[in-house]
Amino acid sequence: MSFNIKHINQYLNWIKNDRKNYKEDCKVSKTYAKLNRKLNRALLVKNTRKIESVSSQKHEYIILRLTEICSDTLNKYRNFQVPENLKTPNHEIKVWSMWWQGEDSADKLFRMCIDSARRHTGHEVVTLSKDNYSKYFTIPDFMLKKQQEGKIALQHICDYMVMAIMAEEGGLFTGATVWWSQDVGDDVLRAPFFVPKAESKSQYHMSRSRWVGYVMAGNKEFPLFSFVRDALEEYWRKCDIAIDYLMMDYLFEFAYRTIPCVKEMIDENPDNNLLRNELIDRLSEPYDEETFKRFTEGDTFLYKLSWKFGKKDEVTEDGRQTNYGHMLEECNF
């Protein structure tokens, strides 16, 4: 009986959330809302074929809408002239991260991740914030106004900042919840283009793991960065709501399809850091030196953590130090 009641309650909650999400998605368009509803229903019953089919339909709809909305950016880059130094390593090593309120206001997880980046890149990491970004680039006033009005989420302002700093300065950007486990060489720090990659055939995510938004490196001349920055400016100039939470993935795909040298560089970037999502669910396991070497001596040298997922206990119930506790102990704060 309890089994049935549990699943009935889960289904009723799903219906409630479905109605709420559909209403919210209609602010983008009814087509988008219907596609999301079909996808969520396929996910509910775990219909793999339907998930793949509807995901593909949703992705193509969003790309078509972006083609219409960002037409000026598309025309600007349609005949892009490939820079001569496209594949030349960066002369200067620059490492960036971001915390909107400033590093002094950051939480323990962020400070741990930034400390790991500083130790393993061997370079200072500049933390971009609302107080210092203007030293490097400008955020259009209309975007800041829309962010203050609640039309642009802080996440999307931060996405813009990532692309702006890469377009203006180049170098390496590392996200607020990326933990570096090993020293990083010049092949990454000076890379003409680098992102963690583990290409998948699944259509569920637009990226198919060909790229991520939380770590990237490259020359400032690499047109992916300025294209996405310019597309974001045009999009937010014309729109008041994000077409999807993962807009960055769709704009990367937009650039991939639009600019041949972007496609070439993304395709040439080899699969790497294949275990980058493995540590997130093992933070609260008891620390064991030999077992932990899996994270510090393998082919994966960066790990994506999260505020939302993965328990982050520093000690177990019986008082043993956890992996997370050990990682914090290594920090210089």
Image: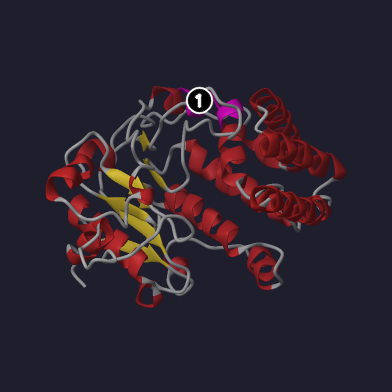
Front one among 140 and 185: 185
Classify mark 1: residues with Cα within 10 Å, few (<14), some (14-19) or many (20+).
Answer: some
The residue that appears at 53% across and 54% down in the rendered structure is 159
Give the vertical position of 33 relative to 199 (above or below).
below
Q: Is residue 108 visible?
A: yes
The residue furthest left is 290
Look at 62% across and 34% down and name the residue there: 254
- Which amino acid type is shown beneath numbered disc 1? Lys
The answer to whether 91 is drawn above or below residue 147 in the figure is above
Where is residue 248? Give x, y as percent: 57, 45
Can you tell which quarter of the image residue 236 is in?
bottom right
Q: Quadrant of residue 193?
A: top left
Q: Mark 1 points at which residue?
A: 263
| In the displayed structure image, the side of residue 104 where residue 75 appears, left or right | right
Q: Whole-percent x and y of residue 323? A: 25, 56
Secondary structure mostly seen in magenta is helix
What span is colored magenta in the figure?
A: 256-264
Asked whether residue 292 is drawn in magenta, I would say no
Asked if residue 184 lies left or right of residue 57, the reply is left
How many callouts does the rendering have?
1
